[in-house]
Amino acid sequence: MASIRSQLLAKVLRMTIKRKFTASRNLVQERDNMDKLAVMSVKPERGRVTTLGGVPGEWHEAQLGSKETTILYLHGGGYVVGSPTSHRGLAAMLANLAQARVFVLDYRLAPEAPFPAALDDAVSAYKALLDDGKDPKKIVIAGDSAGGGLTISLMLALKEQSIPLPATGICLSPWVDLSFSGDSMQTNAKADAILCKESLTWLADQYLGDVAADDRRVSPLFAELNGLPPLLIQVGSDEVLLDDAVRLNKFAKKAGVDTTLEVWHGQVHVWQLMSRLIPEAHQAIHSIGTFIKTHIDD
């Protein structure tokens, strides 16, 4: 059962963020609002700002010293909002718990830069890690929401180009079906405290451009998933994206991928970002850290 804090948080989010985002179409305001939500995470120091493969981003190091593990983190925000600022707290916690260096990629956003801009930026950043001499067996690709979908799309693009894949992939509340074919889009419409089909449709419209919503490059749920590295998938039971996560796990297993699915009862979309408010965020990030350390070669 979700903690009392989680239950109260869901009620507050349902009355505030969900209602406002559904009604708003102001890009400047929504991007600012997303960055302000960083107050719900632990407050770390700003990371080292630099570029990776020509794409800007922010490095975070483990406080007690990072090992050889590198996490390429792809933030969520529907391909339209989100930044290293909004995900700074989560990145810092991941660095500490996985004893890793984390690079939060500031990939280009839609509608100014629709598909394939985000995917191209992610590929460029990953290639730069390899060019810098990073062992792919010590690289993790991780992301939440749209970034969780981009995590799968990136690995599929790497596979297609015969580029060595990372050790593992982490998908938090992944958005892997922009055609909205999952049943939970309706069955969890009221329960979800943050997202709804209306807001997601608007986000998808900004990103897709001329690409079909079920194109495997933007909806990797429909791609051939064989050959991917081990995956950890976390999702809240009340999310409209629940079936995205469940089906990703099912289809990946069917394709022979070693996948681990964690469905967290009563949790909101990407609750891992809310570590200052709810204990389940800490617990989930601890689970991610353990998973990463288990799947990285010593």
Image (cartoon, rainbow, N blue to C red):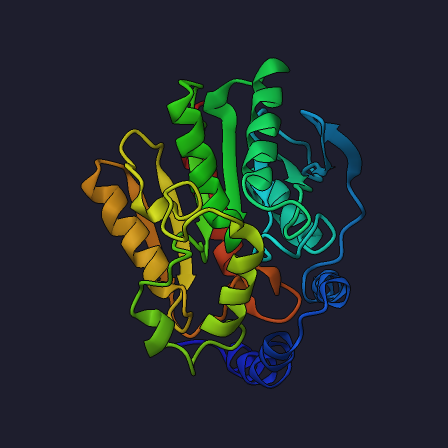
Q: Residue at x 44, y 19 (%)?
A: 163
289 relative to 90, above or below:
above
Q: Is residue 17 left or right of residue 143?
A: right
273 relative to 250, above or below:
below
Q: Residue at x 49, y 65 (%)?
A: 201
Residue 178: x and y, percent? 42, 56
Q: Is residue 130 left or right of residue 164?
A: right
Residue 18: x and y, percent? 58, 77
Instruction: Name the residue nearer the viewer: 28 or 195.
Output: 28
Q: Residue at x 50, y 59 (%)?
A: 283
Instruction: Name the residue nearer the viewer: 59 or 43.
Output: 59
Residue 208 shows up from this direction: yes
- Total labels: the figure holds 0
Q: Residue at x 66, y 57 (%)?
A: 81
Q: Is residue 249 left or right of residue 159?
A: left
Residue situated furthest left in the rendering: 254
Residue 144 shows up from this direction: no
256 relative to 281, above or below:
above
Residue 26 image-quadrant placement = bottom right
Q: Is residue 43 left or right of residue 115?
A: right
Residue 73 image-quadrant placement = top right
223 relative to 24, above or below:
above
Instruction: Name the residue nearer the viewer: 65 or 167.
Output: 167
Residue 86: x and y, percent? 70, 56
Residue 234: x and y, percent? 41, 56
In which quadrant is the N terminus drawn?
A: bottom left
